[in-house]
Image (cartoon, rainbow, N blue to C red):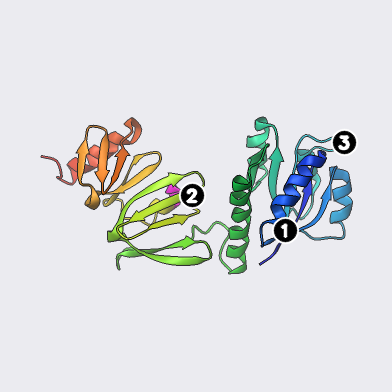
Amino acid sequence: MIINCIAIDDEPLALDILSAYVAKISFLKLQATFDNALQTLEYLKSNEVDLIFLDIEMDDLTGIQFLKVLKNRPHIIFTTAYENYALQGFELDAIDYLLKPISFERFVVAARKVYEKMAIREAGKPANDTDIIQNTREGYIFIKTGFQLQKVNLADIQYIEGQGDYLKIVTVNEKIMTLQNFKNLKKALPLDEFVRVHKSYLVSLAHIQCIEKNRIKIGDAIIPISETYGKHFFHLLQDKNLLP
């Protein structure tokens, strides 16, 4: 699948950087670049695009104003030097919000979000699908990794760690990266077997080797227990009669 995109920015250097980044990603095709939003409106009257890399602070018409008048809006990734527009950007359903100077690594993460969202739609799945297929009766779930759904046995999951926009699922045999969040993943896990102990960690009770004050040991990992999640964690252990 190829994602046709354009870039709008009134800084020539910013457009050069975006063009160079796009050229490195096989599924992105840059159709055109613009130094103002008014020109883009004319272009979009006769050309269809899947994605716009959009600056906000521009003369004549800002990126926000541009979006508000744009019909048949494609996917949007904001590229700006200003943090104060972040909330407004997400209220306008932007896929991502990249702060300048933009690293290539961060650019790739944003581009993959668009790719995965479009791939889901092409497969006939709803846009808000979590990409997690649950079958707890059989003791496994399927997790989307890249372009496939990978079977993961619940009994093998030791813990799950949040890493930015991704989750790292650590099993007894491997580590799996998936573009998910804890909220969606928890819906597919039995809540009496897996518990959140920190904003960045969810653990399997069966794999806990020891608990020392505010830390859990699972395999070679030392996992912190935060005050926010710690009370629920210890209450769950009591409710399951796992504490003397």
| Crowding near the residue tagged with mark 3, few <14, some 14–19, many ≥20 C-alpha atoms within 10 Å | few
Q: Is residue 169 shown above or below 13?
A: below
Tell me the residue that label 2 is attached to: 166
Magenta span covers which residues?
A: 180-184
Q: CA distance from mark 2 to mark 1?
A: 23 Å
- Mark before the other along the chain sequence, 3 or 2: 3
From the image, which quarter does the N terminus lie in? Answer: bottom right
What residue sits 58% from the left and 63% below the top?
A: 120
Which residue lies at the image location 70% right of the left edge and 41% below the top edge? 79
Q: Position of residue 78 (x, y in %)?
A: 69, 43
Q: Report the residue marked by disc 3.
A: 60
Question: 177 or 193: which is nearer to us?
Answer: 177
Q: Are marks 3 and 2 in contact (CB under 8 Å)?
A: no
Q: Are marks 2 and 1 in contact (CB under 8 Å)?
A: no
Label 1 secondary element: loop
Number of residues whose C-alpha sits closer than 10 Å to that of mark 1, classed few (under 14), some (14–19) or many (20 or more) = some
